[in-house]
Image (tube, rainbow, N blue to C red):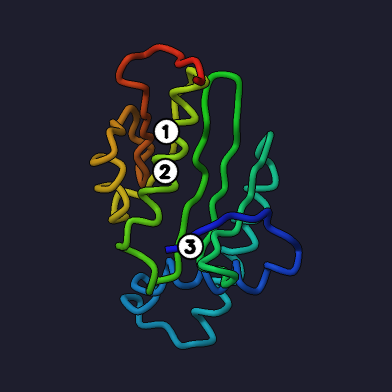
C-alpha cells in the first residue's frame, strides 16, 4: 500500500472528527443513545481530546494517507528521554492490515537509533493493546482505565546510523 504521512492542517478538522467518532462507534452503539446524544457526546469528547493534545510539547501531528486519501492520524510528542505515542488511529476499513504496526515499527526504529524509549497510554478495553504487546511493549503502570506501556530497544543501546 502506498502509505505516506503529511502534517495535519486546520482543514483536517472534519476528517479528524470523523476518525475520532469511528474509534468510539462500538462504545456508542452499546450505550443505546439517540443519534443526537451520540453526536453531542462525541463532539464534546473530540474537543477535549484536541485541547489535551494542544498541551503536548514538541507535537508532531501527522495525517496518514493512502495515496492522497486521509485514512488516519499519528500524533507523537518527542522528548529528551522518550518518544510519546499519544495517538494512532485508522478508519475502520484500513484497520488490521498492518498499517498501524508498520508506522509504530518506524517509531521503534527511530527510538533505537536515538536511544529513547517509546511510551503510550492505552485504554484497557482497546484491542490495540494486543498489537502493542506483540510489538514488544510492556505494561509499566495502571491508571485505572488505561495502561501505561513502554518499549525499549532490546539492546538498550543507542545505534549509530550507517
74 or 119, which lies in front? 74
Going from the N terminus, do you reach mark 1 or mark 3 first?
3
Q: Position of residue 107 (x, y in %)?
A: 47, 37
Specify the label residue 2 is tagged with.
3
* Residue mark closest to the camera, 3 vs 2: 3
133 or 110, which lies in front? 110
For label 3, the crowd category at 10 Å Cα-Cα, with few meaning under 14, some 14 to 19 and many 20 or more, is: few
Specify the label residue 67 is tagged with.
none
Going 30% across and 62% down the picture, which residue do you hit? 96
Check contact, mark 3 vs mark 2: CB within 8 A: no
Q: Residue furthest right?
A: 10
Q: Is residue 32 above or below residue 134?
A: below
* Residue mark closest to the camera, 1 vs 3: 3
Q: Is residue 107 above or below residue 131?
A: above
Q: Report the label total.
A: 3
Q: Position of residue 113 (x, y in %)?
A: 48, 22
Secondary element at tag 3:
loop
Q: Is residue 65 above or below residue 108?
A: below
Q: CA distance from mark 3 to mark 2?
A: 16 Å
- Rendered image quadrant of residue 119: top left
Q: Which residue is mark 2?
A: 104
Q: Position of residue 126 (x, y in %)?
A: 32, 55
Going 45% across and 16% down the picture, which residue do you hit? 159
Q: Which residue is mark 1?
A: 108
Amino acid at each position: 500500500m502506498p502509505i505516506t504521512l503529511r502534517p495535519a492542517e486546520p482543514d483536517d478538522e472534519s476528517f479528524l472528527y470523523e476518525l475520532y467518532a469511528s474509534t468510539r462507534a462500538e462504545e456508542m452503539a452499546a450505550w443505546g443513545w439517540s443519534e443526537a446524544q451520540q453526536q453531542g457526546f462525541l463532539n464534546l469528547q473530540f474537543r477535549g481530546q484536541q485541547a489535551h493534545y494542544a498541551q503536548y510539547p514538541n507535537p508532531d501531528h501527522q495525517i496518514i494517507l493512502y495515496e492522497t486519501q486521509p485514512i488516519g492520524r499519528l500524533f507523537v510528542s518527542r522528548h529528551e528521554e522518550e518518544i510519546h505515542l499519544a495517538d494512532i488511529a485508522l478508519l475502520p476499513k484500513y484497520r488490521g492490515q498492518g498499517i498501524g504496526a508498520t508506522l509504530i515499527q518506524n517509531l521503534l526504529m527511530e527510538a533505537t537509533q536515538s536511544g529513547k524509549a517509546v511510551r503510550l497510554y492505552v485504554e484497557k478495553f482497546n484491542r490495540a493493546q494486543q498489537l502493542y504487546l506483540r510489538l514488544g511493549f510492556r505494561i509499566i503502570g495502571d491508571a485505572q482505565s488505561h495502561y501505561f506501556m513502554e518499549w525499549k530497544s532490546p539492546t538498550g543501546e543507542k545505534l549509530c546510523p550507517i
